[in-house]
Amino acid sequence: MGRVRRRVVFVLALALALPACGGGDGMSEDEREVRSTVDDLYEGFAEQDAGRICGLLARKQREVVAKGGGTRAPASCEQVMGVALNYVSGKGLEDADEAKVTKVAVKGRNATATVKFKGRPARIGLLKEGGEWRVSDLNLKQL
């Protein structure tokens, strides 16, 4: 009975350890987090939520967006993104939450994600900033 009991304990321990090893999907934790960040970004576009989108951007990317306002008065990422979202309203971004991340490549603190949306591929750069993956390279024309 001792041998059977040890085998049962071994099988249970193995079953409990498997989810901690990545769940068997072959992706690293960083790859899953990058996918999640990109999915959240596209959901933000679908919901036209400037705050959510800007919250997913790396610090320098937020600054780039804010400077894109072109006004002399300081603008925030959220203000500029809100104007941009109003401009493209009704032009297909309401389906952005259907975008699919098809490929992720992680190299240290940098990553790239390839996204397919409406049959077109887009490449998005990400940076691990403060322990979180943030979008560092976003070309709105690719959306």
Image: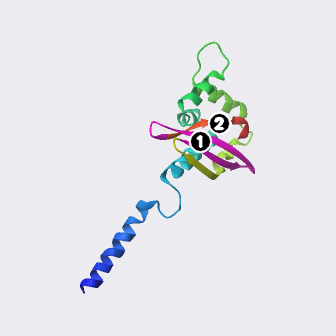
Tell me which residue sits at (72%, 34%) in the image. 88
Q: What element carries label 1?
A: helix
Say which residue appears at 63% left-offset and 29% top-offset.
81
* Disc 2 residue type (three-letter): Leu
88 in the magenta segment: no
Q: What element carries label 2?
A: loop
- Per the image, the residue denoted by label 2 is 138
* Mark 1: amino acid: Leu
How would you rate the neighbour count of disc 2 (Cα within 10 Å): few for under 14, some for 14-19, many for 20 or more?
some
Q: Where in the figure is residue 15, as x and y percent of width and height?
A: 39, 70
Residue 21: quarter of image? bottom left
Image quadrant occupied by the N terminus: bottom left
What residue span does the magenta drawing correspond to? 110-132
- Rendered image: mark on residue 72: none
The residue at the far left in this view is 2
Q: Earlier in the sequence, mark 2 or mark 1?
A: 1
**Percent x, y for residue 71?**
66, 15
Q: How far apart are marks 2 and 1 (CA)?
A: 10 Å
Residues under numbered marks 2 and 1 in contact, where contact means CB atoms less than 8 Å apart: yes
Asked if 79 appears above or below 27 in the picture, the reply is above
